[in-house]
Amino acid sequence: MTPLHLATRHPSPKALALLLKHIGPGEVDTQDKNKQTALHWSAFYNRPEHVRLLIKHDSNIGIPDSEGKIP
């Protein structure tokens, strides 16, 4: 789990937007122990603004988690 994952739990996308400004290439798709990205978490928590932000920052929408589910 990364700070990006945790930021998806907060209703406001401000923390996520701030973190996205300071991450390195490829970090947006870092997976947790269940192979879920921050995009998976955003979808799970029904955070459409977070989803838009992550996609805008090149989050890969086709990464499956450990159960084969994609965001």
Image (tube, rainbow, N blue to C red):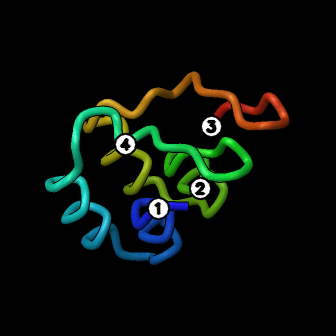
Q: Residue furthest right?
A: 67
**Residue sitting at x 31%, y 30%:** 58
- Position of residue 42 measured from the top left corner of the image (x, y, whole percent): 53, 55
Amino acid type shown at disc 1: Thr
Question: Mark 1 = which residue?
Answer: 2
Q: Are marks 4 and 1 in contact (CB under 8 Å)?
A: no
Image mark for residue 28: 4
The residue under label 3 is: 71
Q: Earlier in the sequence, mark 4 or mark 1?
A: 1
- Out of 61 and 31, give the one closest to the viewer: 31
Quadrant showing the C terminus: top right
Q: Earlier in the sequence, mark 3 or mark 2?
A: 2
Q: Amino acid at mark 2?
A: Trp
Name the foreground residue: 26 vs 9. 26
Q: Which residue matches tag 2?
A: 41
Query: Considering depth in this image, is 48 or 10 the residue closer to the camera?
Result: 10
The residue lying at 43 percent from left, 47 percent from top is 51
